[in-house]
Image: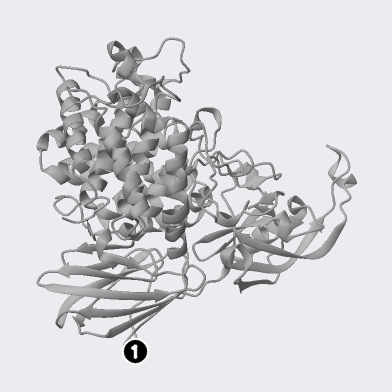
Amino acid sequence: MGAFIVDTSNSPYARLRPVSISNVKVNDDFWLPRLNTLARVTLPRMYNLLEETGRVDNFRRVSGDFKGGFRGLLFNDSDVYKWIEATAWLLTYMHSDELAKMLNDVVDAVSKAQLPDGYINTYFHDRLSNRYRYLRQSHELYCAGHLIQAAIACRRGGACQRLYDTAVKLANHIVDNFNDHGIVAVDGHPEVEMALIELYRESGDVRYLNEAVFQVSTRGRGTLRGFGMPNAWDFDDEYFIDHKPIKELNEVPIAHAVRFLYLMSGTTDVFMETGDKGLWDALNRLWVDLTETRMYITGGVGSRHEGESIGERYELPNDRAYSETCAAVANIMWNYRMLLATGEAKYADVMELALYNAALAGVSLNGREFFYVNPLASRGYHRRMPWFEVACCPPNIARLLASLPGYIYSLSSDGLWVHLYVSSSVRARLGNNVVELIVKTSYPWDGEVNMVVNPSHSDEFTLYLRIPGWSRGAKLMINGGDYEHELTPSTYVGVRRSWSYGDEVTLRMPMNVDLMSSHQHVLANTSRVAIRRGPLIYCIEQTDNPGVDVYNIALKTTCRLEARFNRVLLGGVVIIEGDAYELGTQGRLYEPINDVKLAIRPIKFKAIPYYAWANREPGPMTVWVPLMDYYDKVVKNQLSLR
């Protein structure tokens, strides 16, 4: 049994199938310290917080092992389930007696809280007459989905069968109640769709596939209107993605960002099992609309604080960006599934972008504090917190990081695919051959990737290597000789040959410092640029630039920019240094343009990776900076083309 985060091994409409997490060994200087911190600091602290805030006692209370009232919010069960999933994935490749004991204790508490009919929800245990009456806000199926996913992680990781049995009983309860002859409605927060499909893949029981199809096909028919809580907060049907069937969506709705992305993930799962063309066409339309008009340069999604929702096209404010950490995790989950369905590199590009930027910013370098909201500009008041009353983001980023080895590689009928460049080794079966691939790299700081291919016997197969969309001028060498075919950004190069033990492959991707512009309709970024190097987006933080307000730093396209690795700073990062200008502050709020007088002086500046900001003393930060010669350059380029 493989420890697969998404098991498309037998999915008829998936091009790629996963490699078991247990067959991947990460020894990367960038990621391994983070995984160690996750095991030694983050997950144990999170367990203590789940105990301190009463989340685990809520389960013990149901079973009679704890005396007291329910504590917290109605969806708090899901935080426990996500912690279980993260811990189960991590224990598949890291030994920890401490975490194993914690996991066993929590699983015991959860399993004992299940009712005889399979229902489990600690908030509604005292309100059973109201269960499923308030689906618009109750999160009952959302919580159930997270329990099912946690149970599958436990089973695939070999951690525990008991929770899987609990999940099966719960899933059977859902199947019996939600159907055309029972409750014809969906949950206000999509999630259970992914869980049901994965349970179908794990068990082979077609009832779970049929239930997922029911959930997806029922969504968008306004069925939630009769399931609202009295006097509860509410939004319109579009917010819940319940205003139109998925197949009829031509653009991304003004919806809760995480709900939308979870629904898209579950819908992609349904497509990979059914091949429903209408769903696939909608998924592609919505992916293009999201990534080309509503996604931050960091891969973050969600521009509005109101309802944690996605905004209109090009509505991408910086200091008011919501860009919830959970939405970044969900964006990775959706793009990973689209990648499995197609093998197209554009999905891996977005997955990598969100991973290294919007998602990774959600946790501090010491693994102890978290962002819920991820702005792209701040006056210095926005800081990470150890926990939140609504604590969805901390265990969500934990389960993403714990499952990271599962995102690096995939298999197809003819070869091995490398999606993320991480120093690691993998063992995978290709036909009657077992292939080991050893990868060594300093990515994301350096674009050179060295690989050694070790098949158990010489054999012909394809090694698929992603050429990232940011890469220009990439070169490939095999056993010291140049690979003669062109390497196109945002594609996979498929090297098919007869491979022998010890064959060496070297991929060199120059990492230039690029100044990035945005669409002219993104008003917050008019005449501004952001700095990108490789997969990383950079920001300018006050602590690195004393004596100047970072909001007043401006660049020219002719400014000299240099990348330099600093092994001490922020755990070791490549910083961008160079020439810039400080713009003096305009005196009045408004004045005629001919009267404006700005003192401009040359300065030196320093930028750090966005994910690493807010790990030192508070101070202003910005991603997008003014470009002094923006319009001059645009006009000049246009004239030169005539």
Q: Is residue 59 left or right of residue 18?
A: right
Q: Residue at x 23, y 44 (%)?
A: 152
Residue 120, percent across and down?
A: 26, 26
Q: Which residue is mark 1?
A: 481
Name the kind of residue labelled 1 in the image: Gly
Mark 1 element type: strand
Q: Is residue 239 above or below residue 488?
A: above
Residue 255, percent across and down?
A: 44, 31
Q: Is residue 360 left or right of residue 562?
A: left
Q: Is residue 95 above or below residue 478?
A: above
Asked where in the image residue 48 lies, by quadrant, the reply is top left
Residue 146, percent across and down?
A: 31, 37
Q: Is residue 87 left or right of residue 510?
A: left
Which one is nearer the viewer's eye here, 239 or 162?
Answer: 162
> Can you see residue 545?
yes
Which one is nearer the viewer's eye here, 489 or 546?
Answer: 546
Q: Residue at x 42, y 69 (%)?
A: 28
> Can you see residue 251?
no
Task: State which quarter of the image contains the N terminus.
Answer: bottom left
